[in-house]
Image (spheres, rainbow, N blue to C red):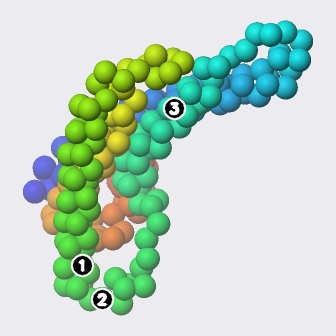
């Protein structure tokens, strides 16, 4: 089981590297479009009739993709909010039971989100955004991609916990991205 976790974790490292590059690109695109819209609204419009109507739409859709692509990294490093009032008071067996219950519920929610996300993408195949004319399947598939990647991270973490490499509810301390000497193998 340790070998499986190590292989899945290496794939997770690659996924996180790719996501980091995509996120940086999306942040640059988002910041650029918002800056251009501000300059357009307060400077360019005052001196000419030229405008950039597509910047608001680009900023909106890039923000949505940014949020969903960052989710797997946030989950991996344990940066999501959690209430440790209950599980800190449990023993080792109680923590493991609560961990399994919460992760199974998490996977169920992610499965439902992916299922209905695919349904929404299928119903929006003919849709095109009003200004950019971006296809609907690109605009509406962000939740599907984000949930699939988070599910991969949940499964990888669970295998790490079951193999004894990671501790329930504290896996993010060891699986920091990029991995460091303190957190695990130094690959990144």
The reply to whether discs 2 and 1 touch (Cβ–Cβ < 8 Å) is yes
Q: Is residue 59 visible?
A: yes
Q: Earlier in the sequence, mark 3 or mark 1?
A: 3
Please tell me in which quadrant of the rendered image residue 100 appears: bottom left
In depth, the one of 20 and 39 nearer the eye is 39
Q: Is residue 53 left or right of residue 135?
A: right
How far from the left and from the top, in percent, is residue 26? 52, 29
Which residue is at 72% across, 25% downward? 37
Please tell me in which quadrant of the rendered image residue 174 appears: bottom left
Q: Quadrant of the N terminus?
A: bottom left
Q: Which mark is residue 98?
A: 1
Mark 1 neighbour class, 10 Å CA radius: few under 14, some 14 to 19, many 20 or more: some
The reply to whether discs 3 and 1 touch (Cβ–Cβ < 8 Å) is no
Q: Earlier in the sequence, mark 2 or mark 1?
A: 2
The label nearer to you, 3 versus 2, is 3
CA gap between label 3 and label 2 equals: 42 Å
């Amino acid at each position: 089981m340790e070998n499986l976790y190590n292989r899945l974790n290496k794939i997770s490292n690659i996924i996180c590297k790719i996501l980091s590059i995509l996120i940086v690109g999306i942040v640059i695109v988002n910041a650029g479009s918002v800056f251009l819209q501000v300059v357009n609204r307060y400077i360019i419009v005052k001196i000419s009739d030229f405008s950039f109507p597509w910047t608001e739409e680009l900023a909106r859709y890039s923000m949505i993709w940014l949020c969903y692509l960052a989710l797997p990294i946030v989950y991996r490093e344990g940066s999501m909010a959690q209430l440790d009032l209950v599980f800190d008071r449990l023993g080792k067996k109680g923590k493991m039971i609560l961990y399994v219950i919460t992760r199974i519920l998490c996977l169920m929610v992610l499965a439902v989100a992916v299922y209905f996300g695919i349904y929404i993408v299928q119903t929006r195949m003919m849709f095109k955004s009003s200004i950019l004319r971006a296809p609907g399947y690109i605009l509406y598939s962000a939740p599907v991609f984000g949930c699939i990647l988070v599910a991969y991270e949940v499964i990888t973490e669970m295998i790490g916990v079951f193999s004894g490499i990671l501790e329930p509810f504290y896996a993010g301390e060891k699986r920091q991205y990029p991995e460091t000497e303190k957190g695990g193998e130094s690959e990144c």
